[in-house]
Image (cartoon, grey):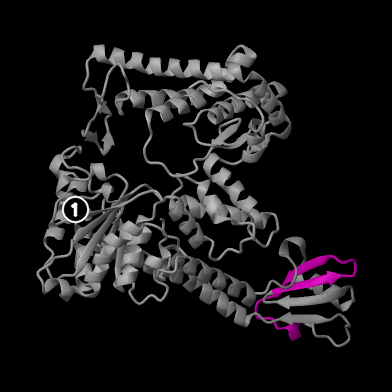
Amino acid sequence: MNQHPNHPHRQPQFSPPKRGNSFMYVIVFALILTAAYYMLNPTQGVDDSKATEIPISQLMQDYRSGQYTEVEIKNSKIYATTRADKQVLAYKPEGESITALGLNDPNVSTPVTIISTEASAFWISLLSNWLPIILFIALIVFMAKQLTKGASSAFTFGKSQAKVYSKNDKKRTTFKDVAGMEEAKDELVEVVDFLKHPTKYTKIGAKIPRGVVLVGAPGTGKTLLARAVAGEAHVPFFSISGSEFVEMFVGVGASRVRDLFQKAKRNAPCIIFIDEIDAVGRQRGFGMGGGHDEREQTLNQILSEMDGFENDTNVIVMAATNRPDVLDAALMRPGRFDRRVIIDMPNLEEREAILGVHVRNKPLDKTCDLKKIAQQTPGFSGADLENLVNESAILAAKKDKTKVSQADMEHSIEKVGLGPEKKSRRLTDEEKEITAYHEVGHALVGKLLPGCDPVHKVSIISRGMALGVTWFVPEEDKHLKSVSKFKDELCSLLGGYMSEKQTFGEVTTGASSDLQRATAIARSMVMDYGMSEELGPVIFGEKSMARFLGTELGSKPNYSEAVAGKIDAAVSTILNEAQSRTEKILKDNKALLEKISKVLLKKEVLNKEEFNKFFAKSKAKAKK
């Protein structure tokens, strides 16, 4: 499962200051200096553009005659305000004092204000001369720091980017935090014991597997299981993704691999975990650059480092992938990744245990039954179940509830598995009627055929891309499918198509996805499972191992054009037989089809109990 930033095993990391911070400091410093300039150079007095300039003699004459209400003297400028509230300006002769001019005459009642500007003049001179120099020096220092950072990053470019989880972390993950996967945990107990007691194995001459690859579908808990191994063994855990090795520069990936293994050896015993190893571990020889391809050089370095481990190094490499078929053979040979741990999708009991782990910190209502939720979620991975529980908690909080109820959990199953309700998608009455008959056709045929799973819910409320949903939920997990089960499922898939055709005389585009699934099943029966009576137990089609840039080119046909025609004919035969059976079932139960469809139109949703009531006293027939 993906690691969350707030996971208890994630160690706090120091965040270096951003590169733009230094430049921001310079800008802030400049603004402070500018503010100081205006604080020390007050703009008191009158704006020169609004004052009328007059001779100094006229100003003195008007001053003595009492025509001014206020006089301000600032440097060589004399501002005066007339009784009509007009501003005048006169310039004081150089060298003349205020006393000589007579502006301090005690017989005149007009107040005279002198604004001292000696300190302001000093700061104005200082800032005007030194501010550009200070800003220039700050710019030089900022550029020098950026160049230093660039040079240092060039030396660390080839260093490993692995995250390190300390063995002293109090909130470490253990096997108790991993629900299910008992067989996988048993396989890894030996690894944990070796890391704890290595001498017990080395004394008898035993060597623990140097590499363990965890294989499973996305979301099954491969990363969580690897972290639990480190937590159980109390050893450091180096975690890195396969894509973090590869860069556009030649040799960087190999350099990071060397640095990672050197760090691991210094911290032995420890675990190196490489997630999505297929990003660098794909088969060699199919890339654009041949042996000089950067990804292949990284893989070569991993191979040589794993071979270079001494017997007493106590460093175990763990990796995870969901594509083991694309891994290079040299990577999977004994001595490297010589132990493969398969992690399957959780079964019924494991799903219930996983749900129990994820509801630990969520208050549940008494109505919650985790076993029923587990029964309704076949095919869900651990990540899907975690998402389900989280969605149910969000839904409960949205309704201002203090506890999560069973209804919240079941609603979240539909949201995660089928998609959210499309309440804005409004159907016409005709479309709703067609959708109702279509979905009841699926449910009715599936109910009457023993090979189909029980009907859990029928709905004509739009979800995701579908206008309606018929939900079949198996009562138990099954790993094998028979020919009869495939044929019954084909009939159920064609139930909506044939229901539309019989009821309305034509079909709509709503059956397209059902036909695609039915065709895929029929073709798999013929080509992949050998279930065709005409062609016999032969597997047709051969997966090509040739890859270009890690992508499959497709499948290589191992049969002739004549056989291809027979395959198409066999697929058509299977589908035609299913169509005939479905048509017969719907004709024999036409009244029941109409009855259930009308009720569904009114209620829009029929659950399992409501749907089964229609069959309690009816004499429904199915042709076997």
Of all residues, the one furthest to the left in this rendering is 205
Q: Position of residue 483 (x, y in %)?
A: 38, 27
The front one of 121 and 193 is: 193
Q: Is residue 60 left or right of residue 382?
A: right
Left or right position of 466 against 336: right
Q: Is residue 165 visible?
A: no
Q: Specify the amino acid type for callout 1.
A: Gly
Identify which residue is drawn at 20% across, 64% down.
Answer: 261
List x then y, in percent, for residue 149. 32, 65
Q: Is residue 85 magenta?
A: yes
Q: On the image, which quarter does residue 67 sit in? A: bottom right
Q: How many marks?
A: 1
Quick check: is 417 in the magenta stretch? no
Q: Is residue 137 left or right of residue 67?
A: left
Residue in the picture at 43% in, 70% down: 133
Residue toward you, 288 or 472: 472
* Above or below: residue 313 compared with residue 320: below
Q: Is residue 155 visible?
A: yes
599 or 423, nearer to the observer: 599
Outermost residue toward the bottom? 106
Please name the residue that numbered disc 1 is placed on. 251
Nearer-the-camera pick, 291 or 195: 195
Residue 561, image quadrant: top left
Callout 1: 10 Å neighbours few (<14), some, many (20+)? some
Q: On screen, 330 above or below 522?
A: below
Q: Position of residue 318 (x, y in %)?
A: 26, 59
State the extent of the magenta-drawn residues as a range.
Answer: 77-101
